[in-house]
């Protein structure tokens, strides 16, 4: 194996980081942080809790971006020193540690470079993810639960905050649907490329004859609404149903009729929430979810008009977006980017970073 040219690699990642710093505009981020700190320091800030939450949340995100950029810049500047110290050790034991740090910094900068591609109107928002079982009966319900676990494990690996708002369990196994919120900078922009139909082919554990089955689960990703979004909802256009929360055997759930289901009559959009302890809280959370879905519908309608003017008749890229084959061979393949891997267990355990990165790059170039 050829010897690594450490300084050349360091120069390359330094140049990449410089371009990232220009795109993200570090001076502008610092000014935003200063302005938000001033707003957050107003004595009566929490007289308006909603506005206070928006300000503190934005401040936290901007500070996080600055800390990430500053931290990576320091690590890049420390790399030559690490290799210099490693070279001075007689047994060469420090070189492996320096190489690991170089690889880790390279990976972190690569991830940040992908983030610079997320410049859509809502890309920096939190994300609401809804997963539904589609064609395939009990197989599809089980598959929907596997998809849910995949995303929850992905979020866990990246230390992303997740709030499960509602889960409807199927009778025999798996789930009918679930909705959860992912709170993190650029959660929507990152995870929106996962929207579409996910297809599974496997030997069914529910088939006594061990035949191969194909099942489908749909993934919907929408941005969380902000105060500035102005999504008006007429109360007369909403049907409210109250019911008792439910869950699988042994799971602690509410024993009162506190779960809330909202149906937006003009669009047919249905949302539910059962994770809060009171009916009022569940209704407020469900209303926020409904606003997010209506916001996304509005965005899609606007995009459809633009596509019509451009003569874009390609259809939605989200449908049939990924295939997972567990038998007779093992492969996960993205049908849009052609990225694939044979390590199906890793993917189903939440290791989907390469698929997401390929999706973001594909969306940018398409």
Image (cartoon, rainbow, N blue to C red):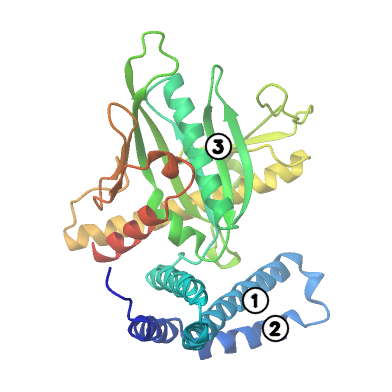
Cβ atoms at labels 2 and 1 below 8 Å apart: yes
Nearer-N-terminus badge (1/3)? 1
Q: Position of residue 284 (x, y in %)?
A: 69, 48
Q: Which residue is mark 3?
A: 178
Q: Which residue is mark 1?
A: 59
Residue 344 vertical placement versus 44 (above, below): above
At 48% from the left edge and 46% from the top edge, which residue is drawn?
A: 350
Q: Which residue is mark 2?
A: 37
How many angstroms separate mark 3 from mark 2 (CA)? 37 Å
Looking at the picture, tell me which residue is in the foreground, 332 or 365.
332
Q: Position of residue 354 (x, y in %)?
A: 37, 56
Say few, some or many: other residues with alpha carbon within 10 Å of mark 3 (under 14 / 14 to 19 / 20 or more). Answer: many
Say few, some or many: other residues with alpha carbon within 10 Å of mark 2 (under 14 / 14 to 19 / 20 or more). Answer: some
Quadrant of the rendered image containing residue 109 = bottom left
Say few, some or many: other residues with alpha carbon within 10 Å of mark 1 (under 14 / 14 to 19 / 20 or more). Answer: many
Looking at the picture, tell me which residue is in the foreground, 219 or 52.
219
At 49% from the left edge and 49% from the top edge, which residue is drawn?
A: 293
Nearer-N-terminus badge (3/2)? 2
Furthest residue in direction front, as rendered: 90
Looking at the picture, tell me which residue is in the foreground, 270 or 331.
331
At 62% from the left edge and 38% from the top edge, which residue is drawn?
A: 166
How many angstroms separate mark 2 from mark 1 (CA)? 7 Å
Drawn side of residue 344 relative to residue 290, left or right: left
Locate the C terminus by quadrant: bottom left
Drawn side of residue 112 relative to residue 34, left or right: left
At 32% from the left edge and 81% from the top edge, which residue is drawn?
A: 5
Furthest residue in direction top, as rendered: 208
Locate the N terminus by quadrant: bottom left
């Amino acid at each position: 194996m050829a010897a690594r040219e450490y300084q050349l690699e360091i120069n390359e990642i330094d140049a990449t980081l410089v371009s990232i710093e220009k795109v993200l505009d570090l001076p502008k981020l610092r000014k935003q942080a200063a302005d938000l700190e001033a707003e957050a320091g107003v004595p009566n800030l929490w007289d308006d809790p909603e506005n206070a939450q928006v300000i503190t949340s934005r401040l936290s995100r901007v500070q996080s971006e600055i800390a990430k950029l500053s931290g990576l810049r320091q690590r890049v500047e420390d790399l030559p020193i690490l290799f210099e110290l490693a070279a001075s050790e007689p047994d060469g034991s420090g070189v492996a540690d320096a190489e690991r740090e170089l690889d880790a910094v390279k990976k972190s900068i690569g991830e940040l470079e992908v983030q610079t591609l997320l410049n859509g109107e809502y890309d920096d928002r939190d994300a609401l993810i809804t997963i539904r079982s589609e064609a395939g009966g009990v197989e599809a319900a089980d598959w929907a639960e596997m998809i849910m676990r995949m995303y929850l494990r992905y979020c866990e690996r990246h230390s992303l905050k997740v709030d499960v708002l509602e889960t409807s369990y199927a009778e025999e196994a798996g789930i009918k649907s679930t909705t959860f919120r992912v709170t993190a900078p650029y959660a929507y922009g990152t995870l929106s490329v996962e929207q579409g139909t996910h297809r599974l082919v496997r030997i069914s554990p529910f088939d006594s004859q061990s035949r191969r089955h194909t099942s489908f689960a749909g993934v919907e990703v929408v941005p969380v609404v902000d105060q500035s979004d102005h999504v008006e909802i007429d109360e007369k256009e909403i049907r409210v149903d109250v019911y008792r929360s439910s869950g699988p055997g042994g799971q602690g759930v509410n024993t009162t009729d506190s779960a809330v289901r909202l149906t937006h009559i003009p669009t047919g959009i249905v949302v539910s929430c059962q994770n809060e302890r009171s009916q009022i809280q569940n209704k407020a959370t469900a209303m926020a979810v409904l606003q997010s879905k209506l916001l996304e519908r509005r965005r899609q309608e606007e995009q459809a008009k633009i596509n019509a003017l451009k003569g874009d008749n390609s259809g939605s890229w989200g449908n049939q977006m990924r295939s997972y084959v567990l038998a007779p061979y093992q492969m996960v393949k993205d049908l849009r980017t052609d990225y694939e891997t044979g390590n199906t267990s890793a993917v189903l355990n939440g290791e989907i970073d390469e698929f997401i990165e390929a999706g973001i790059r594909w969306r940018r170039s398409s």
